Amino acid sequence: MAMITNFGPFARLRSDASQHVIQWKNGRRKASGRGLVFWFMPDNASLAEVPLDDREMTLFVKGRSADFQDVTVQGVLGWHVAQPDMAADRVDFTITPRGGRYNARPIEAIETRLSGIAAQVVIDYLAQAPVRALLDAGIEPLREKLAAAFVGEASLDDIGLAVVSVRLANLAPSSELERALQTPTFEALQQKADEASFERRALAVEKERAIAENELANQIELARREKQLIAEEAENDRNRAEGAAQAQQIEAEAEASRIRAVEQAKAEAEQAHMAVYRDLPANVLLGLAAREFATKLETIEHVNVTPDMLSSLLREFSAARVAPAPAQLEG
């Protein structure tokens, strides 16, 4: 917006580079350009200010499809003034000489014209196809159609306007119809979700069955190994028992052999000993027996010697003294 400073009967206008200012005096154009600064007399001057920057407006159009269903289109149109002098001639951009405010609403007038053109294009487009086809096609065909319509629109060229962008955000039916159209999709998605859930449950059951079978197989294998271990332990016990019995038998046989050998040695020694005593005279044997008997006695309190015993011993002793010595063989 241009800034106007009043100094009594005079005023000073200062505009930005994005504003095109036109000054008329006495019905004649005195100044025209962007970013102007000049002095003027408000009482005999007429001013117009045309914005040159890009502007955007909201687009909202409601129409009917070929099957009589309400469809709403939302988007944004970008536009700017390409010919400011031409726009000032066709649209009221005049401003007050002392305050610099618009006398009318030129921006709203331009946007109303743009909305009317866009609405006509959208309504015609929606009426050519049923709602399902429109939704399947999406917003891109309509956007291209709108862009082409604004490029060739003579009413915009006459006022020096140019549409620089067309952006559509949504093409949707009424909420009731949208829910009805979404129902099959929701049901299909729900069916897929149910199938996925069923598959997950079936997979879980299968995994649980596999786990149970694996546990059962492990139990069977453990039982088999336990049985095998018990059998091996029993076999080891039998082997140990047999080994112990064999060892005892061998030890017993060895002991028996040792006892037999000892007893045989004793018998042989006894036989030899008896052989020595076999040829001895009776008196000698009696003496040896008395001596052996004497070794077994610790004390002798008294000895009884009868006359018969004494006479018998004397006779035997005398006979032994007079007995001739055995002859020696000459070689």
Image: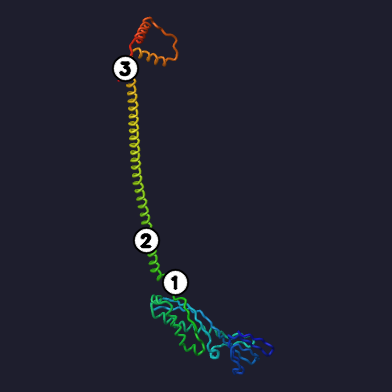
Q: Is residue 214 above or below residue 119?
A: above
Mark 2 = which residue? 199
Q: Residue 64 location, x and y as percent?
A: 42, 78
Mark 1 = which residue? 175
Which badge, 3 or 1, is on the more N-terminal residue? 1
Q: Are marks 2 and 3 in contact (CB under 8 Å)?
A: no
Packing grade of label 3 (10 A; few <14, some 14-19, many >=20) is few
Query: Element type at marker 3?
Result: loop
Badge 3 amino acid: Gln
Query: Element type at marker 2?
Result: helix
Name which residue lies at 38% across and 4% down: 307
Q: Is residue 97 above or below residue 260?
A: below
Which badge, 2 or 1, is on the more N-terminal residue? 1
- Quarter-wise, where is residue 134 in the image? bottom left
Mark 2 or 1, which is nearer the eye? Answer: 2
In space, the residues marked 2 and 3 are separated at their CA atoms by 130 Å
Left or right for 95, reference 247: right
Q: Is residue 222 above or below residue 102?
A: above
In space, the residues marked 3 and 1 are separated at their CA atoms by 162 Å
Packing grade of label 1 (10 A; few <14, some 14-19, many >=20) is few
Which badge, 2 or 3, is on the more N-terminal residue? 2
**The furthest residue to the front:** 331
What is the number of callouts on the image?
A: 3
Mark 3 = which residue? 328
Mark 3 or 1, which is nearer the eye? Answer: 3
Quarter of the C terminus within the rendering: top left
